[in-house]
Image (spheres, grey):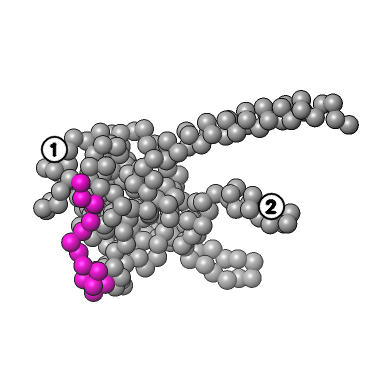
Amino acid sequence: MKYRFFLLIAAFLVPASVPAAGGSDIKLDHYEYSFRNKTSLQNGARLFVNYCLSCHSAHFMRYNRMAEDLGISEQVVRENMIFDDRKIADPMTVTLKREDGEAWFGIAPPDLTLIGKLRDPDWLYTFLRSFYKDDSTVSGWNNSVFPNVAMPHVLWTRQGIQKPIYTTSVDDVGRETTKISGFELVREGTLTREEFDHAMEDLTNFLYYMAEPKREDRIRWGVWTMFFLFFFATLAWFLKREYWRDVD
């Protein structure tokens, strides 16, 4: 019984993002998300609808919900973020059929509403900046964080084209291992490296927000709930001690 109790406690204490870091042994760049930075979230939303929403849907997010949360007027959303006959209250879906996605990319592009729950911000931020030219793949692109990813680099005109820099190491038994240690820009994009990194911070921020829009509220209420439980437990302990004070 005690064993099961400790297992239950451990399950609550293990961070949810632990299993999300897999897929590569590449060192991830840190990114600190901020749901209070509305400017970042608004720019991330603009990037998402212009570069991601053509293939990737967001079935669990509605345009009007996004507009309300991020402080974007519904008129701006209608004129700049909805490119077909969808209504402002409709979910952010795509017209791309699943079978077409499988035929073109080898796999249907996944829905991205909950990608921020599957992958943590560091993974998303590093992934978006780690595409490189690879003529051996079907799309002509590859990614050091997600090797052999089916997704092409849709933002290459902004970032430019980069090629990987490889380093070779030898272990104690003489086995050689070749890894990607960095990238060299071979063709410039419309943005500088700093500008592109900042844009990917905004896109990462939006993807992380979209997975759990009320994350900040949940954390705030969670802290207050723990304070209340602690206060109530203390009060109950003093009350119990008072009731049983004269009992041997």
**Label 2 crowd (10 A; few <14 / some 14-19 / many >=20):** few
Residue that label 2 marks: 6
Pinpoint residue 129: horizontal percent, then vertical percent: 34, 52
Pinpoint residue 17: horizontal percent, then vertical percent: 50, 51
Q: Residue at x 42, y 36 (%)?
A: 216
**Label 1 crowd (10 A; few <14 / some 14-19 / many >=20):** few
Quadrant occupied by the N terminus: bottom right
Q: Residue at x 48, y 56 (%)?
A: 21
| Disc 1 residue type (three-letter) | Gln
Pinpoint residue 215: horizontal percent, then vertical percent: 42, 40
Quadrant occupied by the C terminus: top right
Q: Note whether 5 is above or below 108 in the view shown.
A: above
- Front residue of this view, candidates 68 and 28: 68
Span shown in magenta = 89-103
Q: How many numbered discs sit on the rendered protein? A: 2
Residue that label 1 marks: 75
> Is residue 110 in view from this perspective?
yes
In the rendered structure, the answer to whether residue 218 lies left or right of residue 207 reads right
